[in-house]
Amino acid sequence: MTPLPPVHDLTDPTSEFSTGVERALAATGYLFNSANSARYVADVLQSVNLVATTVARTTAPFTGATPAELRARVAAVDLDTPLADTTAALAELEPIYLRDAVYFHDSRYAAHLNCPVVIPALAGEAVLSAINSSLDTWDQSAGATMIERRLIDWTAERLGLGPDSDGVFTSGGTQSNLQAMLIARNHAVSRLRLDPDAAGKRLPALLDTLRIFTSEASHFSISKSASMLGLGYDAVVSIPTDADRRMDTTALAAELAICQAEGLVPMAIVATAGTTDFGSIDPLRELAALSRAYGSWFHVDAAYGGGLAVSNRHRHLIDGVELADSVTIDFHKTFFQPVSSSAILVRHGATLGHVTYYADYLNPESAARADIPNQVDKSIQTTRRFDALKLWLTLRTMGAEGIGALLDEVIDLAARAGGLLAADEDFELAADPALSTLVFRYKPACMDDDEADDINPRIRAAVFASGEAVVAGTKVDGRHYLKFTLLNANTTLGDLRAIIDLLRRTGASLRAATALSGSAVSTSAVSGGAA
Ligand SMILES: *Cc1c(COP(=O)(O)O)cnc(C)c1O
């Protein structure tokens, strides 16, 4: 390797680079270009090595550091006084970030849907950020646009959306759901405008009539989208779920009939394929049929369950997804990709035109006419990362079956852990696992609901503060529960047994401390612990 050019301390007033112009010249030494590849390799390798050694010696998912501790350490850094070089800046990250980060790589992490990541995707991450293609226009991306489009076609084909389908990568399920609801809204409005009575009305009057139907277990981003799209939170009709936490189709049919009788417009039915808490999958075919009957847009939020599209053993669980008008899929969940990597797919590509806006300086209409592929025509973002590259390298290395096998593994693990919890007298399982989550609570014999409500959030906080494990919490029918979200195929049943025992021990000692202090609602027994 050629020797690195010297690093100049840009803040040292006695250095040879004392004037502004000289400092600017020295700063160009940091630009990544053909003259600077040695520095690039050296600095990036340092950071990669640091991450590798940090993860290799990590033995728990967290240290229990508190917000106050980390806020103070971050605040103590003087951002106006740079360090000498990348080595020093990376070393400084140890106390303010790396030591106390939350490690999804660890087998005792069992909380949220953020996943352990596969190595081919990390290789992709290195390439895409260094080349820095932006996927808004062809003249900033070239082949990157073609790779993204191939992956959109591949995904749509896996979902069975048909030859006219299209889509675009997004920052996450929240954005995909927002875009889907935007398309559904504009689709409904354009149909309303066909009615001569409505043609002259202002938009707010039309929006006021639109309703979205989704289950009570659906993701909050649906309600948030309704609010952001000018419909209001109360435009969302929440449909109850059955014992398996799937949308109750009888209740939905009744609400649709009421909507119609009141002269309102059923703008969209939103099914969830993998609810965030229970992993439950709504009855897609029945919902598609109701959608058709009422002329609604049928959106499937498969942010979590999307990975089933590449599962050998569980693909059938999302049968019916091919009937959707639009689908949300999060590659950064069940495809084991780093944040962020997600997409929205639509059955009819032309419906993406609801977000098209031609700007003379970026994507003039003449470019669209000339068939120049500007992805910004389909996206609500402008500058956009080439996140598709991570999935590309993953498919080209592990293959779709490899990804599906990782998901199949954690689905099996959840089933086995569900068996453990169901047989354990100290715990109560809220529902049989559908995908890779388990919702349960600590509730030994003769503990009533109120005591369980008091103690379960405290167990979770205490375990988080200990750093020994990370589990999630949620509410079911108004009661506090604990939750495992399993996405790590390296986690064993033994690991989960150890977490369950930790939860039991923590629960028992909190109970004992509460009994001693004589108060059923004392929270002083366990200090700290962010929720
Ligand atoms: C995670 C999730 C979302 C939101 O996706 P983000 O990528 O976090 O924005 C939406 N819907 C469901 C069902 C999810 O599980």
Image: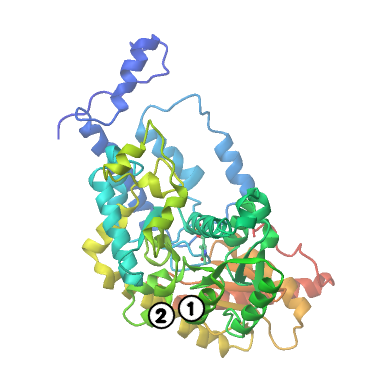
Tell me the residue at 49%/81% (across/down): 434
Tell me the residue at 72%/77% (across/down): 452
- Mark 2, residue position: 319
Tell me the residue at 33%/64% (across/down): 164
Tell me the residue at 61%/45% (across/down): 69
- Mark 1, residue position: 284
Which residue of the protein is positioned furthest toward the left in this rendering? 1
Q: Are marks 2 and 1 in contact (CB under 8 Å)?
A: yes
x then y, percent, for residue 519: 84, 71
Can residue 416 be seen from the camera position used here? yes
CA–CA distance in space, label 2 to label 1: 7 Å
Mark 2 secondary-structure assignment? loop
Which residue of the protein is positioned furthest toward the top in this rendering? 19
| Amino acid type indicated by mark 1 | Leu
Q: Is residue 211 above or below residue 246?
A: above
x then y, percent, for residue 159: 36, 71
Can residue 62 be seen from the camera position used here? no
Frontmost residue, 486 versus 10 = 486
Mark 1 secondary-structure assignment? helix
**For the residue carrying disc 1, how many other residues have a C-alpha within 10 Å: few (<14), some (14-19), or many (20+)?**
many
Frontmost residue, 407 versus 58 = 407
Left/right placement of residue 256 relative to residue 130 reads right
Rendered image quadrant of residue 429: bottom right
